Amino acid sequence: MAEMDPIQLKESGNEFFQNKDYDKAIDCYTKAIQLTKEKKVLATLYRNRAACYLKKENYVPAASDASKAIDVDASDIKALFRRSQALEKLGKLDQAFKDAQRCATMEPKNKMFQETLQRLNHDIQEKLKIQFSTDSRVERMFEVLLDENVGKERKEKAANNLIVLAREDAGAERIFRNNGLNLLLQLIETKKPEMMLAAIRTLSGMCSRHKSRALAVMHFVELDKICSLMALDNEEIALATSSLFQTILDNFEGKDSKEHHGKDEALVLDTSKDVKMVITRLLEMLVHPSVSGHGRDQALNLLIRNVPRKDLAIKDNTKSLETIDLGLKKILKVGGQFPEMPNCLPLTENTCLTASILLNKLYCDLRDDQERANFRKICEGYVTSKFDPKNMDKNLHAIQCVSALLQGPFDVGNSILALQGVMEMMVALCGSDREIDQMVALEAIIHAASKASRAGFIITNGITLLKDMYKKSTNEKIKIRALVGLCKLGSAGGTDYGLRQFSEGSTEKLAKQCRKWLCNQNIDIRTRKWAIEGMAYLTLDADVKDDFVQDEPAMQAMFDLSKSADKTILYAVASVLVNCTNSYDVKEKIPELVELAKLSKQHVPEDHPKDKKDFVMQRVKRLIKAGVVSALAVMLKADSAILTDQTKELMARVFLALVEDVRDRGKIVAQGGGKSLLPLALHGTDVGKVKASHALAKIAAISDPEIAFPGERIYEVVRPLVSLLNTELDGLQNYEALMGLTNLSAKSEKLRQKIIKEKALPEIECYMYEEHDQIRQAATECMCNMVISKEVQERFMAEGNDRLKLMILLCGEDEVKLQRAGSGALATLTASHKELCQKLTTVTAQWLEILQRLCLHDNVEVQHRGLVIVLNLMEADKEIAKKLIESELLEILTMIGKMEDNAKNQNVINVARECLVKAMDYSLIKPTSQHGK
């Protein structure tokens, strides 16, 4: 019945408000509002609910509720003042001032109203000053930028100031309202790259976190104009325009919307048609001959970022389906380009591979067999339509499209290879006299051999052809591609020493030739890249990887190429490094199954002698010396879709291998390894994130975190370490994550709060029950540091848990490190809360016995902590002190207290004496007593 009574609900709401439970108070007031029609009661309920919203800093509903109360009673002074407070927080100072003024008129002697009026008046004056100064600053900046007589240095300064101003919400609004868009278009029309860049970056800042402004900018500047800017043959302008596009699309999709906590809620704008329009224009850009290679790359990157679903749990893949219908053939056309072909579209080194990545992303975004069959049908139709016996260039385009598919959705490319005439066309092109025919065919064969099943087919059908081309051709572009094909086929057995495809020594000869080409500066980068592709396969052989890391010029040449503009090389470089460090997954050999396989005459994989740990460690040290860490850091900075999650996983594997030896971790940190690992631990495949997090844990466990991860970066390390506290991961990962968190939690309260915020406490507590001694010890050591925080202490004080009992029992274990951590935690807890002192004596019957053992411990640190616990208990409660003195602890304290002063044990002696003094203060022992009686 009480729930149906609005007055009772109001009273309940008032009680909840007094107890600071604002959510429950809001519930009560809301129910009461629904149940009553009496105006005076409604006004009070709205006014009270407004007060709750103010406390929760939810200012829009606070102002709304206060207004509803004022509508009933215009002289409701409480409602007026609450609305004034809400409006002030919302930035509506003029309206807030009017409400405060009405309050002060009704109660002129109220100091709070007078102070509010003075504050608001001051704030309004300051806001006007800022507005006028910002307006004049914007005006001056544009004057400088558009004045032909102003020097370059002043213009650059004005451009940078304009960009910075546009990134602030108030600054962006002033530019927008002061004819800024027209002036920015004038800057773009100057055709001067630096002015155009400044204008585009300013537009990007204006669009950031503001949906309606982003929409206005796109329609004012016009989509065609933005696309034409991205199409220019200027990498910086194309990248800046791509960033503008991404900011606009993020706003349209709600990814870049700022949380307006305390601001007017944004208008609901339907931008789905605008998103579709942008995607359509990007697809058109792909095949337009006037679009530069950089512009085409950025269009592909934008499609990769914005079309496929980020989360496959989302059912709607409409954007991918529409993109396939509208643009799959356009993407295939780009993927089928070859620079040496006549009428080739403008490309960069990265264009074709980026198209392959987009094809793969679209294919992976499809939900069922029917959608995949449609994708396959379009691809097959496009490729077969290009075959023409009378036009060799069209045939080349078709085979190059197959290569693009083999590098992207491999299954689709593989199904096209199986079509009648495709493989025959590749073989025919290999026998052509034209260099371009041979190159296209060779690259297709290389990509076709990516899976063992296809490699088997090509070994039997194409290996002789490749050998002939390698031996007979005088053109190094042909020779190197033929060699890579042979390398790839030679690695079909993987790391299995017993499945070598070629005769003894042949693999090393191929590798030697690859290294030779790699170091030849006279060969173009695109051709030298293929040498690394070859090494990516050949380094599966332990002899090859050992020779490679001893060839410093070859390693340096590979690292230099990895830093070049050609990002298609990243995966191959990462693969070489994974092979050299043996950081690939190796299946565990079960001796019983090996014997069984031998008996049944099955093949048993063999390990190469140079794949043993000592050889691997030597290779790792050579790589570190050669500068592998800085090369990986540069590779990770690539702002390209080509830096795929799979490539990141390979890099994470390499980093984990590099930090294996404790002695190398300092060098890796000094070369920027800690900074590079953070993005790898937060983004990529699940396996890659775990590997990178484990590498971070290894560094954090033994390094000074403030040196390894300077500044704010230290707080970013917490989340990857916490992610390793997972029982599905192996014990070493759990242990080293706990050690890293122990190290971090010792540094500052801010770090401990970050660990709490990442919800690590339940996991740390879970590992304190672990059977494995080292993991249990690491978890206890971490908790020893964490108990300094009040939130953790409150967990121990809460009723109905065994946290304190567990900590006491851990002190009774035999392991010294465990006892030290447990006793340290108890010392901190008992010093912080008297209630915990009382609780300690009740949770387990063994508490006194364990305490006595600690006070008699051989380890001085453990003994000191035990005595500190005793002192804390005695200071907390006289009755507890009496229990302690009536036990054998008195003899222990007396014995320690009588010891002669010495540096080693002085802290222990001092605490024991303090305990005895406390006992005397309580009159539990007499000062003249020899035995405490």
Image (spheres, helix red, strand yellow):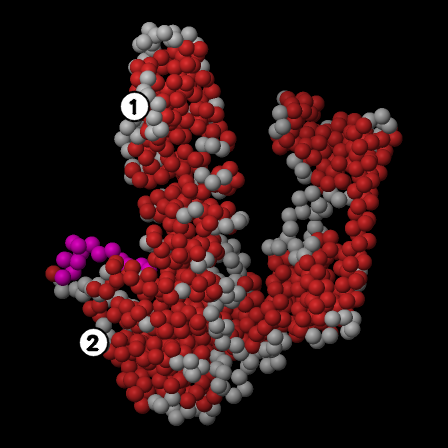
Q: Secondary structure at mark 1?
A: loop
Q: Secondary structure at mark 2?
A: loop
Label whose residue precedes the other's in the sequence (2 or 1): 2
434 versus 802 height, above or below: below
Per the rendered image, the range of residues in magenta is 583-598
Query: What's the residue type where badge 2 is placed?
Result: Glu
Residue, disc 2: 504
Residue plotted at (41% across, 26% down): 827
Q: Position of residue 509 (x, y in %)?
A: 27, 79
271 versus 55 height, above or below: below
Q: Position of residue 911 (x, y in %)?
A: 39, 22
Residue plotted at (43% across, 83% down): 522
Residue, disc 1: 856
Q: Which mark is residue 893?
A: none
Query: Of residues 896 and 541, which is closer to you in this image?
Result: 896
Q: Is residue 597 magenta?
A: yes
The CA span between labels 2 and 1 is: 68 Å
